[in-house]
Image: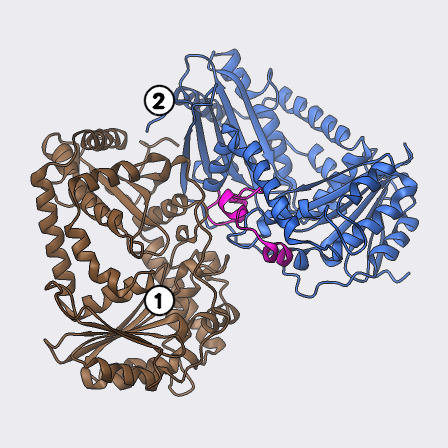
Chain colours: A brown, B blue
C-alpha cells in the first residue's frame, strides 16, 4: 500500500468528545478520514470536494450547484438514476449539498456496502457522461428550485440582496443557487469546465464514519480512488479577497408578501482559521449571549422583557468557512414598533452590553449550552462525519476540529468582549430592513 | 490595399455637427476611424483597446491601469522613456487613460509626424519587454497614485464604497485603479496575461482626427498595424451582468477629514445602446433638468431658492458605457440642515417633479444647453476623436455617434418623464451619506 502519509491522531488522553480519527493521503492527493464509531453497524461515506460556489467563474453563478444535480446522471458504467436505486437497495439513504466552499455527497449504509459506495463515487468523479438533454432537463429543475426556494420567498430574496451588499469583492456575495439570468445561460461547456477541473482526487476528501476499521477503509479507498489521476491544473484556493470595508451599508427590501417586518444586521467576522480559532470561539459565545436564548439573552432581556419592542430576537455566527465569517443580529418588532424604533433599541442594547460586559452567570450559561451543543453535534455518526468534512473542506485540519471543543471551553468573558469590540463595527456591516409597505423610506 | 471593408459615412445632407468620418477594417480585425478636420495642421492619433477594468480577472483589480503605466517601458525596438522623448521632439503632447470599458493612448502632433506615432504604437502593441524591475518600480507608482487619489480623499473613498454597493454582480463595482491589496499582489504573470490577450489589433481601434486625408491614413494604418497578428483567443465582451436589483441600498461613510457633509444617490440606468439611444438621450435631459443648472434646475429651485436646504445640488448621467449607465443626484446641505432633512427635501422635490412633469420653458432651456454642449464637445479635434473612440469602444457605431445629436434634439418632455419614472427606482439605487461625525447612525 503506497500511502504518502498515514497518521493516527488523538489516541490517548483525549477528552470524551474526541473521536478516534485516522487520516491518510493517497498518492493522487486525495485525503482519507476515518472516524471509528462502533455504536451501530452503519457507515457514513462522504465525498467532499474543496470547491463551492465561491470558486465559480464570474458570470457562471450556480454552476457548482448545477453540477451537483448532474452528478446523478449517467456515467461510463452506470445509467442515470442508478445511484438512487443502488442506495435504496442497500436500505440506506443519500444526499448531496453545495455551499460556498464545498460540494459534498454522502450515503448512509450498512457498513458492508461501503465498497459499493466507493466504486460509485470513484466512477462519477471521473466518468460522468452528460448529454445535452441532461443539461436542458436539469437546468429546468434548478430554475424551478430557485423559483420555489428564493423567488417565492421574500426573506430569501432579501437575504440574497443583503448578502450581495455585505461583500464588496468576494464571491461570498453571490448566491449559491445562482442568479437566475446566469443559471439560465449555463451550458455543457460551463459544467464540464467546472467538473474537469475540480472533481479530482487531489481536490477531494473522503470521510468514512461508523462501524469500520481504519486500515480496511484506507485500503478500500486506495483500491477505489487510488487509480484516479490527479488534476495538474487544479488552481489554488486563493480567491479575490475583500478590500477594507469602510462604510456601513443598509438594504431596504419591500414586498407585499411580507407579513411581519423585521430587521437584521450582518457583520463581516473572522472565520475559524487553522491553528487560530480563539476569536471564532469567542464569537460563538457572543452569539449565544446576545441572541441565543429567547429568555436570557441580552437582546431578549432588553427588547422583550424589559421593554415591549421585540417579539423575537436572534444572533447567529457562521464561522466555519475558508475566507470570511458572518455575524448576524436580528429583531422581529412587536406590534406598533417601527423598524426604526426597533433598530434604535437594538443599538442601545448592544451599546449597553459593550459598556457593561458579560455577566458571570450569563457566561457560564453560555459555556454549558455550547458544551451541550458540541456534544450533541458529535453524538451521531452523520453529525461527526459532517463536522470533520466541513472543517477539512474549509481549510482546517483534523487537529483543529479536535481542538475546537477545548478552545470553546477556554473562552473567557474578556475574550468575548474583545471579540465583540472588534466585530461589532458598523463600517463592516449591512443592516437589512424587510417590510411590506410604506414605513421604510422609498 | 487589402481592406475587408471601406465605408464612407455621412457624406451629404448632414447637419453642421456631423463630421466626415471614414472607417475601415484591416484584415487582422483592427478598426480604423479617420475624422477630417482641416482647421489646424495637427493630428490626434489614438489607440483604443476595447478592454478596461471591467474585463480584469477576479482578484486582479487594477491590472488594466497598471498595464497602461507599463506601456511606457521598453519594447524590442525602444528603450523605456523613449516615447516621452519622441513625442516631445515633435512638439506634441501625449497621454493615456484607463476606464471600465477601455484603455486609450493618444498623441497630438503635427500631422506629418503621424507615421512615427503609428510605428510607436504598433511596436508597443506587440513587443513590450518588461523586466521584473519595471514591475516593481511601477507597482510602487500605482500604489502611490492610489494613496494620493483615493486614500487621501474621503470623497474618493466614499465613492469607491458606494460603487461597490451599487453593483451586486457586475465588475463595474470594482475601482478602476484597483483595491490596494490586489494591486500590491499584481505581478508579471498578471500583466502579461492581460497584455497578451487584449493588446491585439482585433481588439483595437485607431482613431486619427485632424488635418489628414482618409485614404492616406488608412494606407498608413495598413502599413504599420496591418502586419500585427490577430489574437485568436480574444474573448467576447460578455461580462457577468447584474441580477434584478430588488432592494435599495444605503452607504454611510464617516471620516473626520470631511468638512462638509453631503449625500448622493446613484441609480442603475440604461446606457446608450447601439441603435437604441433614445432612453439614454432622455436621461441626458433629465440630468440637466433635475440638477444641471445652479439657478434653474428642479433641485436648485426647490432646495436652494424656495427653501434654504441645500448650498448646492447636482445631477449626473454616465451613459456611454457597454453594460450599465449610472444616474446620480447629489445634495450639499445648508448649514444646520441634517443629511436626513436634506434627503427628505430631495425626495420631496423629485416626487413633485414626477407628479408635475417638465415645465415647457425648462425643457427648451435644456434643449439649448444640450445642443450647445454637444457642439462644444465636437469643436476641437481632440474632443472629436475622443467622442468617436469612446463610442466605438463601448459598443456603439460611427452611425450611432453621428445620430446622437439628432436623437438628443428629438427628445420630448414625455420621453423625459417616462425615463424618470423608469430610472428613479429606489430598488435599483444606492444612497450615500458622507459625514464627519455623529449625525448618521453608528
- Measured from the top left, where is residue A86 in percent x and y? 27, 84
What mark, if any, has residue B438 been given in the picture? 2
Q: Is residue A174 visible?
A: yes
The residue positioned 76% from the left and 34% from the top of the image is B383
Left or right for B147, reference A282: right
Q: Quadrant of residue B357?
A: top right
Left or right for B343, reference B228: left
**Quadrant for the C terminus of chain B in the image:** top left
Q: Quadrant of residue A225?
A: bottom left
What mark, if any, has residue A103 been given in the picture? 1
Q: Nearer the viewer, residue A39 or A415?
A: A415
Q: Is residue A81 visible?
A: no
> From what the image shows, is residue A378 above or below residue A342?
below
Specify the subunit that label 1 lies on: A
> From what the image shows, is residue B188 above or below residue A434?
below
Left or right for B388, reference B51: right
- Measured from the top left, where is residue A348 in percent x and y? 22, 28
The residue stretch that appears in magenta:
B167-194
Q: Nearer the viewer, residue B198 or A308?
A: B198
Dot 1, crowdedness within 10 Å: few (<14), some or many (≥20)?
A: many
- Measured from the top left, where is residue A355 in percent x and y? 20, 29
**Quadrant for the N terminus of chain B in the image:** bottom right
- Measured from the top left, where is residue A322 in percent x and y? 35, 56
Check if residue A215 falls in the magenta segment: no
Quick check: marks 2 and 1 in contact, CB under 8 Å?
A: no
Q: Nearer the viewer, residue B277 or A389?
A: A389
Same subunit under labels 2 and 1? no
Amino acid at each position: 500500500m503506497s500511502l504518502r502519509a498515514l497518521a493516527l491522531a488523538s489516541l490517548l488522553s483525549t477528552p470524551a468528545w474526541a473521536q478516534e480519527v485516522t487520516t491518510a493521503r493517497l498518492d493522487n492527493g486525495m485525503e482519507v478520514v476515518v472516524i471509528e464509531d462502533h455504536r451501530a453497524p452503519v457507515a457514513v461515506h462522504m465525498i467532499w470536494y474543496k470547491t463551492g460556489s465561491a470558486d465559480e467563474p464570474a458570470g457562471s453563478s450556480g454552476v457548482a450547484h448545477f453540477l451537483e444535480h448532474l452528478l446523478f446522471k449517467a456515467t461510463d458504467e452506470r445509467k442515470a438514476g442508478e445511484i438512487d436505486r443502488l442506495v435504496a437497495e442497500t436500505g440506506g439513504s443519500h444526499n448531496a449539498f453545495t455551499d460556498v466552499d464545498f460540494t459534498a455527497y454522502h450515503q448512509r449504509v450498512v457498513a458492508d456496502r461501503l465498497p459499493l459506495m466507493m466504486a460509485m463515487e470513484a466512477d462519477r468523479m471521473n466518468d460522468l457522461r452528460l448529454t445535452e438533454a441532461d443539461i436542458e432537463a436539469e437546468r429546468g429543475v434548478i430554475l424551478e428550485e430557485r423559483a420555489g426556494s428564493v423567488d417565492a420567498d421574500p426573506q430569501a430574496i432579501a437575504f440574497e440582496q443583503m448578502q450581495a451588499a455585505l461583500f464588496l469583492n468576494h464571491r461570498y456575495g453571490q448566491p449559491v443557487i445562482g442568479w437566475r439570468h446566469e443559471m439560465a445561460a449555463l451550458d455543457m461547456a460551463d459544467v464540464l469546465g467546472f467538473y474537469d477541473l475540480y472533481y479530482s482526487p487531489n481536490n477531494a476528501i473522503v470521510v468514512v464514519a461508523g462501524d469500520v476499521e481504519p486500515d480496511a477503509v484506507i485500503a478500500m479507498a486506495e483500491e477505489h480512488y487510488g487509480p484516479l489521476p490527479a488534476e495538474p491544473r487544479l488552481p489554488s484556493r486563493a480567491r479575490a479577497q475583500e478590500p477594507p470595508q469602510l462604510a456601513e451599508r443598509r438594504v431596504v427590501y419591500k414586498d407585499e408578501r411580507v407579513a411581519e417586518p423585521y430587521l437584521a444586521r450582518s457583520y463581516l467576522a473572522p472565520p475559524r482559521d487553522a491553528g487560530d480559532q480563539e476569536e471564532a470561539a469567542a464569537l460563538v459565545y457572543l452569539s449565544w449571549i446576545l441572541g441565543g436564548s429567547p429568555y436570557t439573552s441580552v437582546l431578549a432581556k432588553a427588547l422583550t422583557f424589559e421593554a415591549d419592542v421585540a417579539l423575537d430576537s436572534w444572533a447567529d455566527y457562521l464561522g466555519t468557512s475558508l475566507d470570511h465569517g458572518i455575524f448576524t443580529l436580528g429583531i422581529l418588532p412587536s406590534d406598533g414598533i417601527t423598524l426604526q424604533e426597533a433598530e434604535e433599541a437594538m443599538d442601545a442594547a448592544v451599546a449597553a452590553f459593550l459598556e457593561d460586559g458579560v455577566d458571570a452567570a450569563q457566561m457560564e450559561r453560555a459555556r454549558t449550552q455550547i458544551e451541550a451543543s458540541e456534544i450533541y453535534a458529535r453524538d451521531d455518526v452523520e453529525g461527526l462525519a459532517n463536522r470533520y468534512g466541513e472543517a477539512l473542506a474549509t481549510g482546517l485540519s483534523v487537529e483543529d476540529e479536535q481542538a475546537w471543543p477545548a478552545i470553546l471551553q477556554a473562552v473567557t468573558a474578556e475574550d468575548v468582549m474583545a471579540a465583540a469590540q472588534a466585530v461589532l463595527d458598523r463600517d463592516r456591516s449591512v443592516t437589512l430592513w424587510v417590510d411590506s409597505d410604506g414605513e421604510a423610506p422609498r
